[in-house]
Image: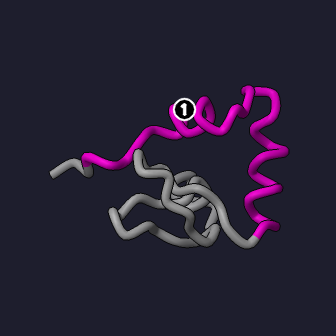
Amino acid sequence: MANKYKITKEEWYKRMGVAPEEIDDKLFELATDGTTEALCTEGCIVEPDGYCPHGCPSLLVELELI
């Protein structure tokens, strides 16, 4: 069953105001910051290697970088 809360990475980029040419910089920022917003419709905050209570991953987990 699909997770009704999970958004795509493209939706996440748009929501976070990240342009395609800024994605590498954003990934570096996420890897070095303590928390980030999960790919979740609810805007849950997670650690870079984490999942929110709705089961949505961080972007780094989604991209399999962690």
Q: Is residue 51 magenta?
A: no
The x and y percentages for residue 36 are 64, 60
Residue depicted at x 84% and y 45%: 25
Is the magenta region chiefly helix, strand or loop? helix
The x and y percentages for residue 38 are 52, 56
**Relative to 7, does residue 30 appear above or below in the rendering?**
below
Comparing 66 with 10, the one in front is: 10
Bounds of the magenta span?
Answer: 4-33
Are there few (<14), some (14-19), or many (20+) residues within 10 Å of tag 1? few
Tell me the amino acid under the disc marked 1: Glu
Residue depicted at x 56% and y 68%: 46
**Relative to 62, does residue 4 appear above or below in the rendering?**
above
State left or right for residue 47 relative to residue 22: left
The x and y percentages for residue 34 are 73, 72
Residue depicted at x 26% and y 51%: 3
The residue sitting at the left extreme is: 1
- Which quadrant would residue 66 be assigned to in this image? bottom right
The x and y percentages for residue 41 are 41, 45
State left or right for residue 39 relative to residue 37: left
- Which quadrant would residue 19 be assigned to in this image? top right
What residue is shown with label 1? Answer: 10
Q: Is residue 31 magenta?
A: yes
State left or right for residue 30 relative to residue 7: right
